[in-house]
């Protein structure tokens, strides 16, 4: 038995949920300006990103991840901002891959720099990868990411990930009404043929800068119906508690899709995710208003036991269920930006 596996050992929050997944943001910077995440009007030339000294070092990240394993962490996802902008990321991957107790080590990227990074990341011990791509049409893609990166660059990154043996490859597509809903079917056809798992994400009201409106959300039901009309689908039961994507498989056995329906089907009841920002703040919810600083105590010399006690206290007090409250029409308050917390 590994530490943290015993019943009752990892701490439960106010609703009985235990820590399982950790998302680590390694940078707040990005080379895209997705309108739903880092709109250029806000994240323009005047925006102050974190200076390097404020970022956790790889050694600090690895130490924090290691001490969270006894608290229940089994799955680690590296994210950002754009994680591949962080220099020598494969060195961090190698350090994390060496930790006993992590069953799943993965990364979410916009794919623009993946072609040259896929092989070194796989060699360092990355096992699988998620690539975000919102359309196969260059004009639509550009309307979403607000930069001139061609779709072909991202597809070349995905191909490199395939060659490097990163599997399964998941592709995340945020769907925004009036912008890319016509890309749903072409994306489904394309990735079904290649055996990758396409996951549609309902456009969410993360942060306060994207000007989110409910009528821009394309609900899960509509996404599934659009695909089902041409490529018949059936639901698949969740693989594990806390799985956020609703899963559907093609009835002809040619693979599956997922839909992350945090707006129309909130899944707070099973939410086992903890998030660490690039500057070392812990957030217990994607829609959190305030983080809990770990970098300060860590740099002040606090030992592992004291840091673990901090995390346990933070998790024990957790009562987040933002998406459920939003669905009930009562969600309010300031929210952290997606580019800080990494999705
Ligand atoms: N830059 C990397 C990328 O885009 O894959 C990693 C960080 S990004 C914040 C992580 C995921 O969050 C991406 O798949 C992105 O599409 C998604 N995302 C960002 N803003 C979102 C929003 N407002 N609603 C839904 N998903 C969003
Ligand atoms: Fe960058 Fe990812 Fe946010 Fe797009 S979604 S702006 S690629 S961090
Ligand atoms: Fe978890 Fe917060 Fe999302 Fe609910 S809203 S599923 S608590 S991250």
Image: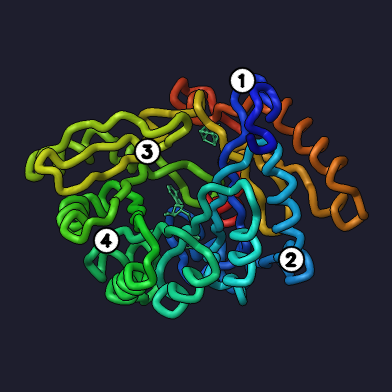
Q: Which of marks 1 and 4 is nearer the N terminus?
A: 1
**Pointers 2 and 3 in contact (C-beta within 8 Å):** no
Mark in front: 1 vs 4: 1
For image coordinates 29% across by 37% down, the residue present is 247
Up/down of 85 relative to 330, above or below: below
**What residue did someone put label 1 on?**
16
**Pointers 4 and 2 in contact (C-beta within 8 Å):** no
Residue 228 x, y percent position in the rendering: 13, 39
Q: How far apart are marks 3 and 4 (CA)?
A: 19 Å
Residue 10 x, y percent position in the rendering: 68, 30
Mark in front: 4 vs 2: 2
Looking at the rendered structure, the secondary structure element under dot 2 is: loop
Image mark for residue 57? 2
Front one among 318 and 143: 318
- In the visual, does 338 lie left or right of 236? right
Disc 1 packing (10 Å; few <14; some 14–19; many ≥20): few
**What residue did someone put label 4 on?**
135
Q: Distance between the residues labelled 2 and 3?
A: 32 Å
Whether residue 42 is visible? yes
Q: Distance between the residues labelled 4 and 2?
A: 34 Å
For image coordinates 40% across by 68% down, the residue present is 111
Disc 4 packing (10 Å; few <14; some 14–19; many ≥20): many
For image coordinates 63% across by 34% down, the residue present is 1
Q: Earlier in the sequence, mark 2 or mark 3?
A: 2
**What residue did someone put label 3 on?**
245
Q: Earlier in the sequence, mark 1 or mark 2?
A: 1
Disc 2 packing (10 Å; few <14; some 14–19; many ≥20): some
Q: How is the image coloured?
A: rainbow
């Amino acid at each position: 038995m590994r530490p943290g596996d015993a019943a009752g050992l990892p701490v439960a929050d106010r609703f009985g949920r235990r820590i399982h997944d950790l998302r680590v943001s390694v940078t707040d910077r990005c080379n895209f300006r997705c309108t739903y995440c880092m709109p250029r009007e806000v994240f323009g030339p005047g925006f102050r990103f974190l200076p390097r000294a404020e970022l956790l070092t790889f050694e600090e990240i690895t130490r924090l991840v290691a001490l969270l394993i006894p608290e229940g962490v089994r799955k680690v996802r590296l994210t950002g901002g754009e994680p591949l902008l962080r220099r020598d990321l494969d060195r961090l991957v190698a350090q994390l891959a060496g930790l006993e107790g992590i069953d799943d080590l993965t990364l979410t990227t916009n794919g623009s720099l993946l072609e040259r990074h896929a092989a070194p990341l796989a060699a360092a011990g990355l096992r699988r990868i998620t690539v975000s791509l919102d359309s196969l049409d260059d004009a639509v893609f550009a309307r979403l990411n607000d930069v001139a990166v061609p779709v072909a660059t991202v597809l070349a990154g995905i191909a490199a990930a395939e060659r490097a043996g990163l599997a399964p490859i998941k592709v995340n597509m945020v769907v925004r009404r009036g912008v890319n809903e016509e890309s749903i079917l072409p994306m489904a056809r394309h990735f079904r043929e290649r055996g990758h798992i396409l996951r549609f994400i309902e456009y969410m009201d993360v942060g306060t800068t994207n000007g989110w409106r409910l009528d821009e959300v394309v609900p899960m039901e509509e996404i599934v119906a659009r695909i089902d009309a041409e490529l018949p689908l059936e639901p698949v039961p969740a693989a594990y508690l806390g799985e956020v994507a609703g899963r559907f498989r093609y009835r002809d056995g040619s693979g599956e899709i997922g839909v992350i329906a945090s707006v129309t089907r909130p899944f707070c009841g099973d939410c086992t995710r903890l998030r660490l920002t690039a500057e070392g703040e812990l957030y217990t919810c994607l829609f959190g208003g305030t983080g809990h600083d770990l970098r300060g105590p860590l740099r002040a010399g606090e030992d592992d036991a004291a840091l673990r006690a901090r995390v346990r206290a933070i998790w024990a007090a957790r009562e987040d269920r933002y998406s459920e409250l939003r669905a009930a029409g009562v969600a309010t308050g300031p929210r952290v930006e997606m580019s800080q917390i990494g999705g």
